[in-house]
Image: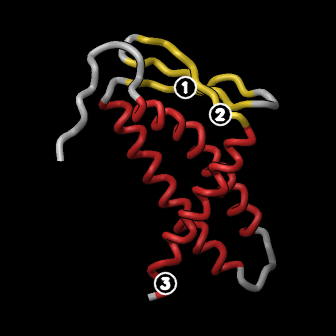
Amino acid sequence: MSKPLVPKTGHPTEDEMYMIRECILLPAIMTMLDNEHQKQEWSSNTFKTLYLGALDLVIDKVHKEFAVVRRELSSRKIKTWTGDSTDFAIYINYNCRGYDGNFFVTRDVARAEISLKLGKYIQDALTPLKG
C-alpha cells in the first residue's frame, strides 16, 4: 500500500483536513476521560477498580490514535495549535506547507462526534473481554 501523494505547498487535502479535525476532537475526548478518571479515583464506588481499568484502556487507545495523527501531520509538514473557542465553536489554527488557515467544529457537531467516537473506543476495549 503506497502513501498518497502530498503536495509540496498549498492548502491541506481532504485527508489532512480530517486529521486537523481530529486534533480538535481527540484532545477533547482525552480531557473528558481524564476528568472522569479523577472523579473515579476519589469515588467510593464498589466497581471503582473496574471503571478505572476500563478508563485506562480507553485513554490509552485515544492517546495512541492522537499520537499517530500528530506524527502523520508532522510528516506532511502541517502544524496545528489551539485557536479561539466560542460558545458556538471550537477553533484550531494550522500551517500547512506555508499556508496559514483555521478550522472549526461547532460544539453540537463536536458533541455528536465525541459520543460516536467514545462508543467505538469503549466497544473496542470491551471486545477482547467478551472472548
Between marks 3 and 2 in the image, the one whose residue lies nearer the viewer = 2
Q: Nearer the viewer, residue 65 or 112?
A: 112
Q: Which residue lies furthest to the left in this view?
A: 2
Q: CA separation, marks 2 and 1?
A: 14 Å
Proximity of marks 3 and 2: CB atoms separated by less than 8 Å? no
Q: Mark 2 points at which residue?
A: 105
Proximity of marks 3 and 1: CB atoms separated by less than 8 Å? no
Whether 47 is drawn above or below 20: the answer is below
Proximity of marks 2 and 1: CB atoms separated by less than 8 Å? no
Amino acid on which the number 3 mark rests in the picture: Leu
The residue drawn where x is 39% and y is 26% is 13
**Colour convention:** secondary structure
Amino acid on which the number 2 mark rests in the picture: Val
Q: In which quarter of the image is residue 128?
A: bottom left
Q: CA separation, marks 3 and 1?
A: 37 Å
- Left/right of residue 57 with respect to residue 4 in the rendered view: right
The kind of secondary structure element at disc 1 is strand
Image mark for residue 129: 3
Mark 2 Cα shell of 10 Å, populated few (<14), some (14-19), many (≥20): some
Query: Residue 64, how many percent across, how many down?
Result: 43, 53
Between marks 3 and 1 in the image, the one whose residue lies nearer the viewer = 3
Image mark for residue 54: none
Whether 8 is drawn above or below 91: the answer is above
Whether 21 is drawn above or below 35: the answer is above
Q: Nearer the viewer, residue 99 or 33?
A: 99
Q: Mark 1 points at which residue?
A: 81
The residue drawn where x is 38% and y is 32% is 73
